[in-house]
Image: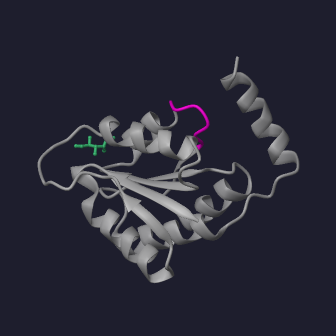
Amino acid sequence: MKVIVTGDHAGMTIRNAVKELLEEKGIEYEDAGCSCETSVDYPDYALPAAERVASGEFDRGIFICGTGIGMSIAANKVKGIRCALTHDTFSAKMTRKHNDANVLAMGERVVGPGLAREVAEVFLETDFDGGRHANRLGKVDEYENK
Ligand code: RB5
C-alpha cells in the first residue's frame, strides 16, 4: 500500500504522529504537506494530494489541518475521492467497510496525536465490505459522472 500524507501549518504534530505509525508499520508513504511554521492555505495541499490518490498513484491519503474540515471539503471536490472526516476508531472502521473511503481527514485542534494514530491505523487496516455498499457507492459515482 502507498499512502500520501499532507497537511497545513495547523496539523504538523498529528502529521508527524501518522508518519511515525507508517514508518513503524513499514508502509510506503510520501509527505506532501507544508514544511514550514508559517500560515498556508489548505486547498493548496489537499487538492494536489487528492488528485494523486484519484489517479491511482497512491492507494490512500491522510490529510491533516486544524479541524480536518477544510481538507475534507477540498478533497471531496476531486473526482473519485471519498474523504471521511473522522476522529474516532469506530467511524474510521465503518468508513472503510461501508464507504470505501480513500482519504482520511483529521484535525489536530480536535484530537491528540495518540488517538489520531489509532484512527489512522484502523483506517489503513480495514477492508471495504463491497456488496450492497458497492451498489450504493455506484449511485454516488453515477451522480459524479453526470
Ligand atoms: C488554519 O487556521 C485552519 O483554518 C485550517 O487548518 C483548517 O482547520 C481549515 O479547515
Tell me where residue 63 appears, x and y as whole percent.
Answer: 41, 52
Instruction: Examine the structure image and report whether residue 81 is included in the region drawn in magenta.
Output: yes
Question: Residue lying farthest top?
Answer: 146
Q: Residue, x 26% and y 60% (percent of image)? A: 12
Q: Position of residue 40 (x, y in %)?
A: 20, 41
Residue sitting at 27 percent across and 49 percent down? 8
Report which quarter residue 59 is drawn in: bottom right
Between 55 and 92, the one lying in front of the other is 55
| Above or below 111: residue 45 | above
Q: Name the residue furthest bottom.
A: 24
The C terminus appears in which quarter of the rendering? top right
Residue range corresponding to the magenta coloring = 77-82
Give the image quarter of residue 70: top left
Q: Residue at x 39, y 48 (%)?
A: 68
Q: Main secondary structure of the magenta part?
A: loop
115 with respect to 98 (left or right)? left
**Residue 128, how many percent across, how many down?**
74, 58
Residue at point 53% right, 46% down? 53
